[in-house]
Image (tube, rainbow, N blue to C red):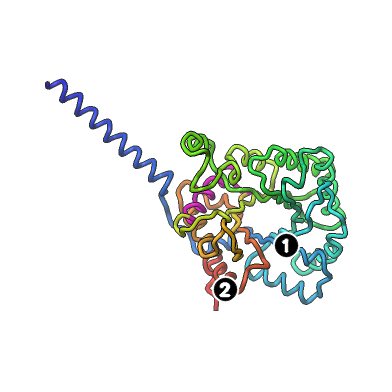
Amino acid sequence: MHTFLKICSKILILLLVLGLLALGLIKYFVFGVHTNIKADIGLKKTNAVWMAHEWVQIKSPNEKVHTLLSEMISNDISLIFLHTGPIGDDGIIPESRYPEAKRFLEMSKSFAPDMKFHAWIGQVRNELHIENPEIRQNIIKDSIHLIKDIGFDGIHLNIEPMQSDPDFALLIWELRREFEAEGVPAELSAAISPIVPELPIKALKLISKDSFLGHDLSLNYSSLKYTKEIAGNLDYVVMMSYDTSFKDLKLYKWFMEQELIFLLKVAPGKALMGIPSYEDVRNNFDSNIENVSTAIDGVKIGLQNIRTNPDDLIGLAIYARWTTDKSEWKTWREKWLGVVSR
């Protein structure tokens, strides 16, 4: 009897230790341990914005361009993803799609010489067969033309959906290789899907057919391994952390925190978190949940998490400039830049 009680007590102690360990792991990995960060952390970052096609298509008056750039400077935006595509189904971007790009860039550089412009080129994945080497080569050729002859500082790829797409990874690798071979001193950035580690994906496949809160992970997320692979050939890795279908503020902020942790793990010093400023009405997006304010809150919570190093985050990227109104810029300045608006 005495021996039996000793065994039971040891089992109870073991279960207690395992329970405490499990609670500790849940606290660390799910809820997080947090510290404080400075309110003006955004001022120390390279912030970006996606910008509309009109600036490369239509001849804009000097005053309008200066007003635009002044707006960017006052909001500490120094990296512009300027829509220049879309890429044709043959991989070619006709010059007729960006007749005013060179003039706009020359004007912009004279007014804001430190601002960088990436040619934002993209297409729907099922309409762009990048598994075809000839199509990839056409994209590469036109990308080099946009840099060498038009004056862009880099290329921004946005091909969706591209979750763990090996052909997209190959295109990025080939672009980097050709830039180096041609002696093109250009930057390369890409918009990527959110990330889910391999282990949760495998576990969910066993119990719920790869679904998380109604999401098919294979269609909406990329793996850590894949994202790390493409990050190795990019200068900027820009996560599209929106269109989540979430209907709860706390859940979206938690999502932003977790995605920031994953992104900084695989792309330290190259990572930008994309945040939404639009009010589209569709099933996978609710602007009351996903907006500039809540996205910044989630990022800041993530930067306070001891699992992240704030210096590894390059900055935030706003999608998009044409949907950002005065109140959203005010929120941006106050919450991210730490500047009290008057």
The residue at the point 58 percent across, 40 percent down is: 223
The residue at the point 58 percent across, 48 percent down is: 194
In primary-sequence order, the first of circles 1 and 2 is: 1
Residue that badge 2 annotates: 327
Crowding at label 2, few (<14), some or many (≥20) Cα neighbours within 10 Å?
Answer: few
Kind of residue at disc 2: Ser
**Vertical placement of 21 versus 292: above or below?**
above
Kind of residue at disc 1: Asp
Comparing labels 1 and 2, the label whose residue is closer to the camera: 2
The residue at the point 56 percent across, 69 percent down is: 333
Which is nearer the eye, 264 or 60?
60
**Residue 256 located within the stretch drawn in magenta:** yes
Q: Distance between the residues labelled 1 and 2?
A: 27 Å
Q: Give the farthest residue toward the left.
A: 1
**Vertical placement of 202 versus 281: above or below?**
above
Which is nearer the eye, 332 or 286?
286
Residue 114 disc label: 1
Residue 98 lies, in percent from the top left, at 83, 61
Which image quarter holds the N terminus?
top left
Q: What element carries label 1?
A: loop
Q: Which quadrant of the figure has residue 69?
A: bottom right
**Residue 123 located within the stretch drawn in magenta:** no
Tell me: 191 left or right of 134: left
The span picked out in magenta is 252-270
Is the stretch drawn in magenta largely helix, strand or loop?
helix
Residue 202 lies, in percent from the top left, at 51, 34
Residue 277 lies, in percent from the top left, at 60, 64
The residue at the point 77 percent across, 46 percent down is: 128
